Image (tube, rainbow, N blue to C red):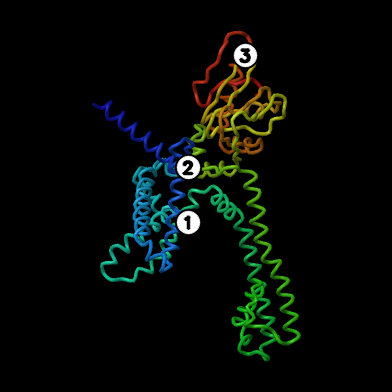
């Protein structure tokens, strides 16, 4: 009886883990891919229906269809929200919490709040509709579903990550921009307050002119008429181009580098799929995520070549790779890593590696690997142990003690010496 209960519990946890990977977008198989695309399409459909419903002619003609889309979308988003709450204990930052605390932490997170606001207006309008309330107030809340796309789109998540990484530079740019607005408004107040006391009678009133001039919209409702005022306006317009281009350039450059560096977004679940990192706390995993580069490799693509210099080691987030050893070929799968021996020994690669199927790799450069080993001695010790085991295996194979090799573990798979 007890064995049956334990088996059922493990089956439930396995199903929960599988469902979490599908919802998180880390599952690359057919059902996971289909679910991810279906949720994106449903968000776009529901937002488009809300927009078209605001047009009276279309709303009257297709009102029943809009109602059906709303009911279906709310039902699907409600189910998704509940499933995300149930699978919250599988999220790496909550792994050390009890299931109840993990679910409460997820409910209070920003993404969960957006998910809740995506469905809350429908339920509020249903209950308040019986009381004759004006339901137009929920129109804006229903459009919050648009922000759910940030969860499903790697590009949007990359852009959010870029903004977060460059927040200090962007804040400095905003501070400088406000300083320019304040200085231009003050100068125009001094130059124009006698000629136009209504428009430039105070610094706050002059700030409206400064904002629209720097933003280059120039409505024309407030313009200087004195010579000094026009000179100040010209300088303000030129300065506006520079100040507005500064944050745009920061974000564009950082985003281009991010896209070039990462072909897909490194998520918690990808890092957690590597057994080497499962024992780390949330802060350590977050630090490692900032060091990892991601790369998508098509099937058959060479990853490393024999004789080239070693600059990085690789973790397999999804897919399989083949190591071409002199005696045989070794296959590595999800969660395993390779390329660490050449980095530790600072030698050249001694084997070719190619992708057997479409593969996602997490790449850790040599500098970041050494820093990781210094900051996390246990991980460093584990990597060195795996490297030593692989070297011993290769030596035994060369002496004829081992003819064939089969990878049966996730972290201690043997590879050729100096690789």
What quarter of the picture does the C terminus occupy? top right
- Mark 2–mark 3 Cα distance, whole angstroms, equals 38 Å
The residue nearer to you, when weighing 288 against 314, is 314
Q: Nearer the viewer, mark 1 or mark 3?
A: 1
**Residue closest to the far left:** 1
Q: Position of residue 33 (x, y in %)?
A: 47, 40
Report crowding for label 3: few under 14, some 14 to 19, many 20 or more residues within 10 A (C-alpha). Answer: some
Marks 2 and 3: which is nearer the front? Answer: 2
Crowding around mark 2 (Cα neighbors within 10 Å: few <14, some 14 to 19, many 20+) is: many
Location of residue 318 with respect to 83 vertically, above or below: above
**Mark 1 sits on what residue?**
147
Q: CA distance from mark 1 to mark 3?
A: 53 Å
Which quarter of the figure has residue 90? Answer: top left
Q: In the shown orientation, is residue 188 left or right of residue 156?
A: right
Query: Which secondary structure, mark 3?
Result: loop
Identify the mark at residue 380; answer none if there is no mark: none
Give the quadrant of residue 114.
bottom left
Q: Are marks 2 and 3 in contact (CB under 8 Å)?
A: no
Residue 320: percent from the left, percent from the top?
Answer: 55, 28
- Provide the residue designation for mark 3: 327
Pick whichever of labels 2 and 3 is earlier in the sequence.
2
180 up-or-down from 363: above or below: below
Cα separation, mark 1 vs mark 2, equals 16 Å
* Disc nearer the start of the sequence (1/2): 2
Which quarter of the rendering shows the N terminus? top left
The residue indicated by pointer 2 is 25
* Near-viewer residue (72 or 375): 72
Q: Secondary structure at mark 2?
A: loop
């Amino acid at each position: 009886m007890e064995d049956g209960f334990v088996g059922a519990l493990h089956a439930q946890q396995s199903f929960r883990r599988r469902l979490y990977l599908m919802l998180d977008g880390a599952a690359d198989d057919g059902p996971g891919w289909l679910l991810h695309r279906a949720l994106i399409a449903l968000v776009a459909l529901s937002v488009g229906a809300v927009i078209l419903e605001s047009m009276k002619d279309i709303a009257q003609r297709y009102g029943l269809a809009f109602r059906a889309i709303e009911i279906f979308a709310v039902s699907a988003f409600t189910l998704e929200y509940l499933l995300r709450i149930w699978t919250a204990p599988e999220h790496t930052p909550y792994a050390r919490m009890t299931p109840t605390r993990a679910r409460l932490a997820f409910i209070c997170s920003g993404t969960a709040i957006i998910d809740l606001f995506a469905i809350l207006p429908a339920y509020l309008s249903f209950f308040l509709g019986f009381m004759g309330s004006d339901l137009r107030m929920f129109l804006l809340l229903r459009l919050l579903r648009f922000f759910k796309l940030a969860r499903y789109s790697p590009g949007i998540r990359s852009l959010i990550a870029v903004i977060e990484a460059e927040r200090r530079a962007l804040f400095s740019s905003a501070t400088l921009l406000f300083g320019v607005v304040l200085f231009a408004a003050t100068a125009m107040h001094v130059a124009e307050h006698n000629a136009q006391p209504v428009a430039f009678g105070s610094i706050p009133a002059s700030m409206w002119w400064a904002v629209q001039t720097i933003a280059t919209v120039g409505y024309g409702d407030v313009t200087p008429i004195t010579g000094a005022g026009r000179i100040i306006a010209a300088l303000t317009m030129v300065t506006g181009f520079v100040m507005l281009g500064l944050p745009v350039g920061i974000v564009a450059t950082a985003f281009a580098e991010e896209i070039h560096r990462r072909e897909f977004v490194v998520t918690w679940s990808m890092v957690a799929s590597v057994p080497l990192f499962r024992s780390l706390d949330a802060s350590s995993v977050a630090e490692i995520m900032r060091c990892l580069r991601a790369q998508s490799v098509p099937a058959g693509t060479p990853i490393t070549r024999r004789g080239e210099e070693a600059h990085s080691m690789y973790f397999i987030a999804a897919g399989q790779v083949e190591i071409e050893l002199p005696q045989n070929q070794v296959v590595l799968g999800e969660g395993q890593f390779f390329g660490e021996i050449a980095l530790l020994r600072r030698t050249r690669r001694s084997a070719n590696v190619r992708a057997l199927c479409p593969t996602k790799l997490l790449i850790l450069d040599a500098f970041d690997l050494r820093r990781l080993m210094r900051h996390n001695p246990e991980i460093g010790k584990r990597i060195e142990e795996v490297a030593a085991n692989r070297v011993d295996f290769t030596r035994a194979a060369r002496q004829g003690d081992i003819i064939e090799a089969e990878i049966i573990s996730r972290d201690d798979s043997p590879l050729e010496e100096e690789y």
